[in-house]
Amino acid sequence: MQFVTPLLEGLKVNLEILVVSTLLAFLMAFLAGFGRLAKYRVVRGITLVYVEVFRGTSLLVQLFWMYFALPAMHVNVSAMAAAIIALGLNYGAYGSEVVRSCLLAVPKGQTEASIALNMTYPLRMRRIILPQAWRMMLPGFGNLQIELLKGTSLVYLITLADITYKGMILRSANISQQSLIFAWMLVIYFVVAYALVLLIRYFERRAAVGRG
Amino acid sequence: MWWDWNYAWSIVPELLRAIPITLAATLEGFVLACLLGLPMALAKRSQLRWLSWPVTAIAEFIRCTPLIIQLFFYYYALPSFGIVMSAMTTGVIGLGLHYSTYLAEVYRSGIDSVPRGQWEASRALNFSRGHTWLRIVLPQSVPPTIPVMGNYLIVMFKETPTLSAITLVELLTTAKNIGSQSFRYLEAFTLVGILFLIMSYPSAWLVRKLEVHLGRRERRAASHGR
Amino acid sequence: MDVKRKVEESAPPIVRYKGISKAYGDHQVLDHIDLDIRPGEKIALIGPSGSGKTTLARLLMTLEKPTSGTIEVNGEQLWHMERKGKLVEADEKHLHRVRGQIGMVFQHFNLFPHMNIIRNVMEALVHVQKLPKAEAEARSLEMLERVGLKDRTHHYPSQLSGGQKQRVAIARALVMQPRIMLFDEVTSALDPELVGEVLDVIKNVASEGEMAMMLITHEMDFARDIADRVLFTDGGRIVEQGPPEQILEHPRSERLKLFLARFRRHFGDSADVMTAVGLE
């Protein structure tokens, strides 16, 4: 148990990154999800490039690029900011596919009925399409949330003092107990992941209330 | 200018030399994941609880914890149990095991998508269990999963940079080494990104084509009253 | 039940289609259609599937854009507007204003599955017509009572039968008080035993309203009962039109004769049978 306290100390960094980059990822997912369906070709083009670049390269490469390569362009970002931006933009790109496909999965008849009731585009999105699409998005977002959590473990490689970093420090001081230290790291991650799964299930249940 | 074209061109050959090992790790890991995923899927949906429960738990554990820590465990901790593996072997096993839990889910959805009537017809024709699985169920459940598996191949390819954490000299490590020699990171890391894009984008496009093709075949089969 | 009312022959039309064409690529769905609908008039559109009847309604509901031609609603251009003395393509604001006079009921109901019945009916009253909530609720309840579903207000659409769903959809469209209502094959997706309740509601509405109606239907008996005028469309044109007795009993064109004969030969004259086989 002596290892758990320092590991949890490091976990705080991961959770901070998790929360902020999740918010960023949500923002990007919706912006790009709607952008992919925009009326204007330019908007569609720009979002497509964003999505394909971030989905087509690797998260760790993006992390390194933000941290090591950006300074060459005289953009200095802290390791923390690089982590949040890379994770947020990366999972935002994946999330945008969830948003886009779920918006498209709402039956066309719903849009037609809204037009027949003379609803404007914003009203129809807000009251009719999004609530239905949101419910379909939750499982996809849930999977991405777990992937994002796991992704936070990579920030160790850009010098952040997260749980992995703490673990490696502990390991060098207690080399004979390294299996135990690694095992604890895995267990802690699993507990957090499981808590997230329960949270997501709660949201899914809530979204399903009243509907057969 | 921040960007030096001459320098960029000069490091391309060295980066290209790292591609074979990156691809090898991807492919070997993928084959392992495919091989492990099937028995895992069968065990997870088995009626025998002493089999299904632990396999499900282990798979969930592997799936919900980060690959990098798993790799550290295999690479640094296993030798104290007398298991010593090279970085490459560790990487392939780590990658393969991690993604076998994803592929197990893919197989499972494939198996579950075989209509009940197929099982009932096999029972009615008095096929043995083995015959039913090998000749009826699996041949029907594998084709629809092929595009999804293709997607995971690409996902695994993009995951290989994580193997740099256990000193495997793949694309990202090579770029980092190049960068640290000249203190120029922009060109090296940008080129790595571009190389990933160049290799993953056409594959993703192929997978999408395959998906459309299979979807069409599926519909044709359905319209022939399968 | 005779629900027909005298239609003012001389009144200006509530809807006027002028040279309306619609094509999807090479496929011509509507070919220079001219059609006037007078206020309060009930017209029924019959014809083989793909003859363009549904498209005619969808163009009026602004769900699809005509390739050429104009539509006027109550004397005002629908798809066009005047700007600096010239007719230009209508913007969303213009469409929004004119569209308020039109309502539509769909083949597949298109109820909002995430809202209960009363919310389905109230939604547009509150958010489009901006009525106070209490008033919107009172009017919605009244309308649900009219279609016989007052005891289902807090159910969700998934808990209703097809016939009940379609009655809710009718209430939802009616409560907006459109000047013309479009019914697009509203019984085609229903089980045969549920068709009657929906047709009764529509007949009821037809008997008391000043509202014009466009009914796209395969229910010939229903068309005969309710319509002031029946139009037979085929190949994107209105081939023949007139009072129901004339069109259904004494068809003149060969195509209409063939259409009606095929109906009777294969399916008898029973509307139920035609619905049962899902004929479009």
Image (tube, grey):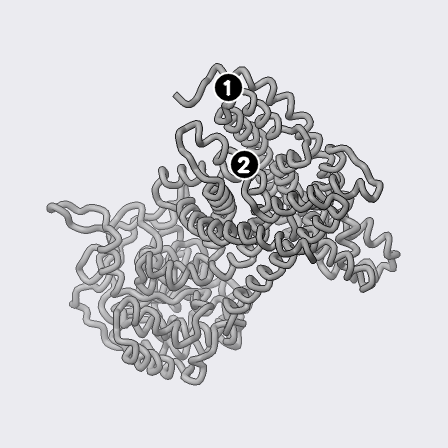
Closest to the observer, C40 or B114:
B114
Residue C217 x %, y % = 41, 66
Instruction: In the rendered structure, find residue B204 and report the number of the disc placed on it.
Output: none
Q: Is residue C239 visible?
A: no
Residue B170 left/right relative to C164: right
Q: Report crowding for label 1: few under 14, some 14 to 19, many 20 or more residues within 10 A (C-alpha).
A: some
Q: Tell me: residue C140, above or below residue A133.
A: below
Q: Residue furthest front?
A: A173
Q: Chain of mark 2?
A: A
Residue B116 left/right relative to C211: right
Circles 2 and 1 in contact, beta carbons < 8 Å: no
Residue at image coords 25%, 65% = C101
Whole-Å distance between the Cαs marked 2 and 1?
21 Å
Q: Is residue C145 visible?
A: yes
Check disc 2 and give the amino acid type: Gly
Residue C56 left/right relative to B52: left
Residue B36 x %, y % = 77, 46
Residue B17 x %, y % = 64, 21
Residue B34 x %, y % = 74, 43
Closest to the observer, B168 or B156:
B168
**What residue is disc 2 on?**
A56
Q: Tell me: residue C40, above or below residue A96.
A: below
- Residue B162: image quadrant is top right
Badge 1 element: helix
> Looking at the rendering, in which quadrant would you find the N terminus of chain C?
bottom left
Residue at image coords 58%, 59% = A196
Badge 2 element: helix
Check disc 1 and give the amino acid type: Ala
**What residue is disc 1 on?**
B8
